[in-house]
């Protein structure tokens, strides 16, 4: 049986004005729910508060790993996950989902 390959994500959450605290609370709650559902790797997520250097606009950045390429689709069909993602949607002005992979420094020129 082939081993599943984790998918590393970098997610940028852009809250609507005045919704920052509510959004951050939901961001913090989602990984434990995803973990209990068996959808993420055991590596704890990293969450940062960020601000655009030019506009000072606040947003949050999260890096985490799906356990495999199918986990995201399964999450959208998992009621416990949707109980967090549903209320998150009206708090967001924008959401950027990026799959990332590291590049060995020896190959960067």
Image: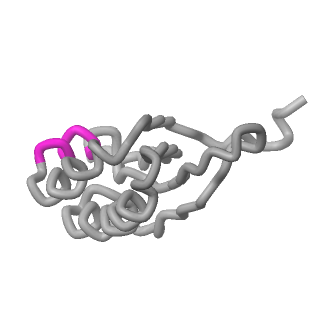
- If the image is split into quadrants, where does the C terminus sit? top right
Q: Is residue 76 magenta?
A: yes
Residue at horizontal 15 percent and vertical 56 percent from the top: 83
Which residue is farthest right? 109
Residue at horizontal 11 percent and vertical 44 percent from the top: 77
In this rendering, the answer to whether 69 lies above or below 38 is above
Residue at horizontal 69 percent and vertical 46 percent from the top: 56
Q: Name which quarter of the figure residue 100 lies in.
A: top right
Q: Is residue 13 magenta?
A: no
Residue 41 visible in rendering: no
Nearest the eye: 19 or 100: 19
Q: Which residues are magenta?
A: 71-77
Residue 28 image offset from top left, x and y in percent: 39, 67
Which residue is farthest top? 109
Nearest the eye: 93 or 85: 93
Residue at horizontal 22 percent and vertical 57 percent from the top: 84
Q: Name which quarter of the figure residue 57 lies in.
A: top right
Residue 25 image offset from top left, x and y in percent: 37, 67
């Amino acid at each position: 049986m082939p081993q599943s390959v984790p998918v590393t994500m970098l997610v940028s959450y852009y809250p609507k004005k005045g919704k920052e605290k509510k959004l951050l609370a939901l961001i913090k709650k989602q990984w434990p729910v995803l973990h209990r559902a068996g959808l993420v790797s055991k590596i704890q997520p990293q969450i940062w508060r960020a601000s655009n250097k030019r506009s000072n606009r606040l947003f949050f950045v999260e890096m985490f790993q799906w356990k495999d390429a199918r986990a995201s689709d399964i999450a959208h069909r998992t009621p416990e996950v949707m109980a967090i993602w549903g209320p998150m949607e009206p708090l967001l002005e924008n959401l950027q989902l990026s799959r990332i992979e590291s590049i060995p420094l020896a190959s960067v020129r």
